[in-house]
Amino acid sequence: ETADKVFAYIRKDGDRRFLVVANLSNEEQDLIVEGNVKSVLIENTAAQEVFEKQILAPWDAFCVELTD
């Protein structure tokens, strides 16, 4: 579940799952993420820190591969 100002989706490619997230506002947003990060593909923030704190800073964006 995401806030109105958060764009997030999971993309599947065979057995691989990718999470794409972007905070489209200038305010912090809560984000509940289930799963673990296998690798970070691109980020303008520390994606692993977002997973630990469950908070997106203003304009945060990242794409990660999730583990099974």
Image: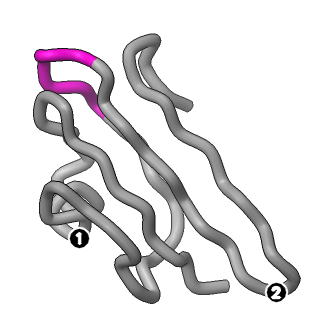
Q: Residue at (52%, 69%) from the top-left corner?
A: 35
Residue 5: image quadrant is top left
Q: Is residue 56 left or right of residue 11?
A: left
How far separated are the C-alphas under marks 2 and 1? 22 Å
Q: Is residue 23 left or right of residue 21?
A: left
Figure quadrant of the C terminus: bottom right
Q: Which residue is mark 1?
A: 48
Kindly indicate whether the residue at mark 1 contacts the one at mark 2 (C-beta within 8 angstroms). no
Q: Residue at (87%, 82%) from the top-left corner?
A: 14
Q: Earlier in the sequence, mark 2 or mark 1?
A: 2
Residue 23: image quadrant is top left
Q: Is residue 5 left or right of residue 58?
A: right
Figure quadrant of the N terminus: top right
**Secondary structure mainly formed by the magenta segment:** loop
**Percent x, y of residue 59:** 19, 32
Q: Residue at (42%, 79%) from the top-left corner?
A: 37
Identity of the residue furthest to the right in this view = 14
Helix, strand or loop status at disc 1: helix
* Mark 1: amino acid: Gln
**Percent x, y of residue 22:** 37, 38
Crowding near pointer 1: few (<14 within 10 Å), some, many (20+)? some
Q: Which residue is mark 2?
A: 15
Helix, strand or loop status at disc 2: loop
Q: Is residue 15 left or right of residue 46?
A: right
The coloring applied to the image is: one colour
**Percent x, y of residue 51:** 29, 61
> Is 8 or 2 nearer to us in this picture?
8
* Mark 2: amino acid: Asp
Q: Is residue 28 above or below residue 27?
A: below
Q: Which residues are magenta?
A: 25-30
Q: Residue at (14%, 25%) from the top-left corner?
A: 28
